[in-house]
Amino acid sequence: MIPAIKNIRAKILRYRARRFKVAGQYGINLKIALKIPSAFVTGSVGKTTTCRMLAAILAEAGKVVGLSTTQGVYIGKEIIRVGDSSNCMFAAELLLDKRVDASVFELARGGIITQGIAFDGCDVGAVLNVYDNHLGLNGVNTREEMALVKSAVVRSARKLAVINADDPLCLAMRNQIVAPDTCLVSMQSDNASVIDHMKANGFAAFLSNDTKPLINLYKGNELIGVMEATEIPAGYDGHFRPALFHAMFAMALAYGMGVEFNVIRKALSAFQSNEETNPGRMNFFEHLPFKVLITWADGPQALEELAHFVQGMNFSEKKYLMFCSAGNRPNQYIKDMGKSVAGIFTHYICSDHVDLRGRPPREAAGLLCEGLMENGVSRESITIASTHQDALEIALNKPSMNDLLIICTFFYDAAKKAVFLKGV
């Protein structure tokens, strides 16, 4: 093991020892055997939607799926727990229910750092991306260190590891994979690493766009299956690129778990990103005189994709954005969130999170405002809300007939309640 990796792992273990009186309570000494089809998913953004898509595919294949995510714990359509459950402690509790015959676990970096991987492995594991979202937290200060944390998921895979070939830090995880197969995922059909991997008879999922956008799954030069991007409702006619990215990961993971492609295609063709199937992620509400979209985009990269979606949909009337940032992010990171959406919307409502996470009120919102102004947005086009609830009220009173309001927040229940109260 190279010294840098040894040092990072030692630092993480020291953090666990400080955080928990019994170091290694989860993931060091304890290893739970997974005897049902299982998937672990991690990454900086997109984990929850990928897990929900995969769970939908497995359900279509006739499985009773135990699902744990940042939103909660589920068995089939039954809600077992509401709230962040993206760690091994909550994942393990699902195994106590004998109805569960397939498992999909979202494993966020915080849970991996503090608990490790509490299982003896999984059938398939995926790393979607490595961004700056949580740098400076839990002793992890660089992307390279974060990549090492997240690589624990693909190191756990026994059958197939799925990684993002467009992210160099994910691609570098290939030499840590012990599973017999690796699938590379790319939004580009000409990704050189994907091409070389296919020449070596490896699995690949990629987006091609000769005459129309298609998502493809290959083993070497053998086509396993293909879908038009417009077949996936969560992609909104192919305009919302992250949904296509998530679908390719879900497709590859499901195939690695033994699901036939026709079942995968049927499930993804039926998967709509609404308040029942994927709450808080790209949910449109049509009962007001104007359109409302509630979603969550954590960080500059995710917000850029949201801005790209808005531009591609060509909404003709005014467009409003309410968005917020967690307080435990660096100043420049929060400013970059503002910069990433500058020039796209008619008016911006900047907000703190409900949980200020160490910052004074309005400070995170003010940094979002600074980022917008540094990229050319006039101060008159920006409102800094005093609280998250105040931001919701301001945002819902801005639009007129046929306008578009995007509420970008992690606090879905509060946003949905405010939207429905507006229509009463």
Image (cartoon, rainbow, N blue to C red):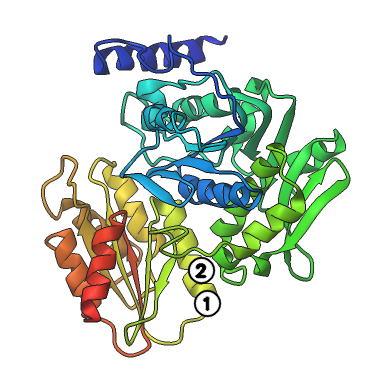
Q: Quadrant of residue 30?
A: top left
Disc 2 target residue:
309
Residue at point 21%, 80% (across, down): 397
Disc 1 target residue:
313
Q: Is residue 413 above or below residue 100?
A: below
Graded by Cα atoms within 10 Å as few (under 14), some (14 to 19) or many (20 or more), the crowding at tag 1 reads few
Graded by Cα atoms within 10 Å as few (under 14), some (14 to 19) or many (20 or more), the crowding at tag 2 reads some
Q: Give the image location of residue 295, x and y in percent.
A: 39, 62
Residue at point 76%, 55% (across, down): 262
Q: Element at badge 1? A: helix
Instruction: Point out the residue furthest to the front here.
Output: 98
Residue 189 in view in this figure: no
Residue at point 43%, 21% (across, down): 116
Residue at point 36%, 34% (across, down): 135
Judge from the rendering whether residue 187 lies leftward or rightward of residue 105; answer left or right: right
Q: Which disc is residue 202 wearing?
A: none
